[in-house]
Image (tube, rainbow, N blue to C red):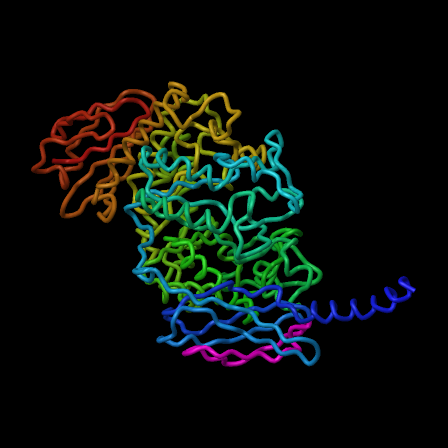
Amino acid sequence: MTKMRLTLLLPILVITMASFAQNRVERVEPPCWWVGMNNPNLQLLVYGQNIASATVSINYPSVDLLNVEKVENPNYLFINLLVKADAKPGMIDIKFTFPKGKPATYRYELKSRQAGSANRKGFDNSDVVYLVYPDRFSNGDPSNDSLAGYPDKVDRNEPYARHGGDIQGIMNHLDYFSNLGVTALWLNPVLESNQPSWSYHGYAITDFYKIDPRLGSNELYKDFIDKAHAQGFKVIKDMVFNHCGSEHWWMKDVPMNSWFNIYPDYKRTNYRIPTTFDPHASIADSSLMADGWFDGHMPDLNQRNPFLANYLIQNSIWWIEFAGLNGIRMDTHPYCDKHFMARWCAAVKNEYPNFSIVGETWVNYPDWVAYWQKDANNRDGYNSNLEIVMDFPLMFAMQKAFDEKDGWDTGLARLYEILAHDFVYPYPDKLFVFADNHDIGRFQRDSSLALGRLKLAMAFLLTTRGIPQIYYGTEILMPGDDAKGHGDIRRDFPGGWPSDTKSAFTSEGRTKKQNEIWNYMATILNWRKTASAIHNGKLTHFIPENEVYVYFRHNSEQTVMVILHNGYQPKTLDTTRFNEFLSGKSEGFDIITGKKIDVQKPIQLSPRSAMIIELN
């Protein structure tokens, strides 16, 4: 009798549970929003079983439900709201009424903005950006190394496995950054990347609104930025709009086929960025460049889809507002739909006029880079609205210039010639300059090499035009050869793990050579913080001669003379050639050595050395 009754009840129970499951709202993104934004329009992505069958209603003062849009997958809805200027913070009850079963209510929060949020300051030429690979810098919280539901585990002996570095580890070393003298921190991607392998790099994102729990949490990320701000640092977030990870939550139930390019089949991109602006490019080549996948585990996002376009724009604004960001570095910028990217840049600047965005423009020639800078004189009329672009041509020149004998177009002439191309840029001072990064073989591939080459490069990098970026570990001669794979150029920072026997975070834990380069860079970096001629002064350079390159940074407040000597023998530099800057000046101060320099007399140059002379 009991068994029969239980059997009769089971179908009723199953039907009730199925009805409840169908009426459940599983996700709403963005997860919250703010009142007082310049753009009053808000589009919510709502995900839940059969959610498209629901009738949606709200009743909240000064918030209007404009319309509800259905797409080909009935498990998605897009709700368009108008948040008026006089709307107040609070909880909006979004009601979903279904043809069958119980209605559902989702409480959506409108927050108040922090004072001054819209006027936050971005990074600029007064800053030096320090690039940190979160998984490889410091493990501040070993308890989050391995978590249930995240199959890619920690193995420090495997270059492409996770190593356990996290946000807490970076936060623990803010004093280190301060002592070194950098002023802004760029973290490689920190959003969830729940891929089965190679998830450490973070560029295959599986949730655009969630910090990877093996790195921390949304709250910890915000706390890190608050603490960084308190110590005078700006923070730059690495964002990826070109693709997501193959394990992204929406891949299990795709909103619509047009959410992705070349889907469900895929072709790999041809990586030929010039096809986006080449006047002779075929449609086949330019389409494959923009729509092809970066890799089989990175589905290519279609920013021409209006729902995805809104989603990505709101996502970046959400993180800026939530976390208090100062800047964004956009990965693979030219691989996205370029017209969308122009719209995105404009939308961000509309909300945050002083905010900074730098796009990864990995191309070989200055005019190719210039195409992507705002207000470029492009024949096709394209305006990217992107103010800061990455100066890859100068990086390539730096990688060769200090290894070659000087010739007509070799050695230091490479630096001169790249800078001579600055006429192609609308804003040559708004270039992101660097000697290496997480995708390039380290400038100091072998830590046993003599320091002259690196010292010359760092003196140049920190005094030329643009916004300098330093890759973590450069200051301690961390080696890395890209020919051995990306794992080799993304090594663990020594001392970042409790089991490390030596810590390069302290002078006691560094070798004599490491301290020599660390102190050299710290001297320049800390002087640079108040060097207005380096921040906003004009660059005037003299053609390299006899293995010596001399240039001046100057404004109404300060004149700085930089001398780069690439030769292997001592040399005497006659200064009469530079009278247009030295006339009337008798003395200067070399900020590297601390010595006074009589600039009216020949200057003695040591082999493979730099001088940064602040003129009196």
**Span of residues in magenta:** 50-74
Left or right, 442 with reference to 518: right
**Would residue 246 be visible to someone looking at this image?**
yes
Q: Position of residue 293 (x, y in %)?
A: 62, 56
Image quadrant in which you'd find residue 472: top left
Question: Is 368 placed left or right of 452 in the picture?
Answer: right
Task: Look at 36% across and 44% down and name the residue there.
Answer: 228
Which of 32 and 550 lies nearest the eye of the viewer?
A: 32
In the depicted structure, whether residue 391 falls above or below residue 106: above
Where is residue 237? Give x, y as percent: 44, 51
Q: Position of residue 277 (x, y in %)?
A: 48, 61
Q: Is residue 458 above or below residue 282?
A: above
Q: Residue at the left extreme? A: 584
Q: Which residue does the image show at 62% across and 78% down from the upper left?
A: 97
Whether residue 545 is visible, yes or no, is no
Would residue 330 be found to the left or right of residue 198 on screen? left
In the picture, which quadrant includes the N terminus? bottom right
